[in-house]
Image (tube, helix red, strand yellow):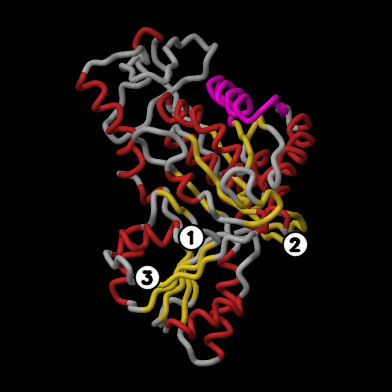
Amino acid sequence: MATREIISTGNELSAIAAVDAGCEFFGGYPLTPSSEVMHVISDLLPKAGGAAIQMEDEIAGICCVIGASMSGKRALTATSGPGVSLKAENLGLAQMAETPLVLVNVMRGGPSTGLPTRVSQGDVLQAKNPSHGDYKSITLCAGSLSECYTEVVRAFNLADRFMQPVIVLTDETLGHMHGKAVIPTLEEVKAGIVPRKRFDGKPEDYFPYECEADEPATLNPMFEGYRYHFTGLHHDKNGFPTEEIETCRKLIQRLEDKVEMHKDEIELNEEFMMDDADIMIIAYGSVSLAAKEAIRDLRKEGIKAGLFRPITLWPSPDKKIKEYTDKIKNVLCVELNIAQYTAEVERVSGRIGEIQGLYKVNGRAISPSEIVAKVKEVF
């Protein structure tokens, strides 16, 4: 695979990735520690024929992105935890109306204002259910500078494939880290873009929400001669509101099944020194960088630890986690929150109360030495 090297930050790489992936619109509101995504993309998009708008608040930021997506454009917003809270209602609208968009959440300490300039992974469960109701979230989690680029590119392709919002979690450490990133060439990124599915028949034969039980809607861009109703209400095949029992049931079940039945297209994980591991460390995001260093140190002492890193957090890689936790007794989850993903590991593995954890919520990173010490303490 041809690659290129860039010296940059995670936030800047997220913005570059969006433009490279064909994003033509950014709408948002500056929020620490995500603001540089907006700063960079506001310079890049006009040069590429797109537009970036700073709106009056986070709610308006997501609304204009939904509007841009309705017109057929790839669209991005970026924020941190409090901004996602404000965007929640309209993320639900995008789920219900099946409007693709990408949201980059550069996580910081919370809840509320929390620790605006410090690192956290406290938005993991928020990313699973950012809005009320039944649907399946798609959430990716970058674990390096390179993945701040590649996961944003992947998010746009998944958003158009599944016709819904896709969240990319980074964090303050990755967002502001400055270093070398090895990323695909622009030609490779462009070659991998899969456009949204379109209906090319007669307008009178167009029913956007009439689709297979495990497939997304086909929403042609607005203003091109195909008419349909756009609503957050339960709707029929034309998008018009309905309370008909079976139509409503099928609609909501499809929002679940279009993701759940195609998890193989979404799931992505990294396994680091897991071949002979008898201690399994589960970590994601910037924490995984410390976990890898800790594993190298442990291996030097003859302790066979390995890392399982979910890159797709939601839907969770349940089968893979179950496979490993069935054969490895010693499991340690390392997170910058209080056991948010550990709860999912326990659910999937069936080992409630058996999974060890190392957690930190004071805005500071977890060091390799802390992970080494925890492994020696509990195992």
Which one is nearer the viewer's eye here, 87 or 5? 87
SS under mark 1 = loop
Q: Which of marks 3 and 2 is in front?
A: 3
Q: In which quarter of the image is the C terminus?
A: bottom left
Which one is nearer the viewer's eye here, 324 or 208? 324
Alpha carbons under labels 3 and 2: distance apart: 34 Å
Sort mark 2 into few (<14), some (14-19) or many (20+) by Cα contacts within 10 Å.
few
Kind of residue sitting beneath label 1: Ile
Circle 2 is placed at which residue position?
179
Q: Nearer the viewer, mark 2 or mark 1?
A: 1
SS under mark 3 = loop
Circle 1 is placed at which residue position?
338
Q: Residue 167 magenta-drawn?
A: no
* 320 on left or right of 84: left
Q: How many labels does the image show?
A: 3
* 307 on left or right of 24: left
Q: In this view, does 80 lie above or below 267?
A: above
SS under mark 2 = strand
Sort mark 3 into few (<14), some (14-19) or many (20+) by Cα contacts within 10 Å.
some
Residue 100: % across, % down: 50, 31
Q: Is residue 363 above or below residue 376?
A: above
Residue 156: % across, % down: 54, 39
Residue 332: % across, % down: 44, 73
Q: Residue 73 magenta-drawn?
A: yes
Residue drawn at x 73%, y 62% is: 180
Q: Which mark is residue 355?
A: 3
Q: In which quarter of the image is the N terminus?
A: bottom right
Alpha carbons under labels 1 and 3: distance apart: 13 Å
User: Can you tell which quarter of the image residue 203 is in?
Assistant: top left
Range drawn in magenta: 52-74
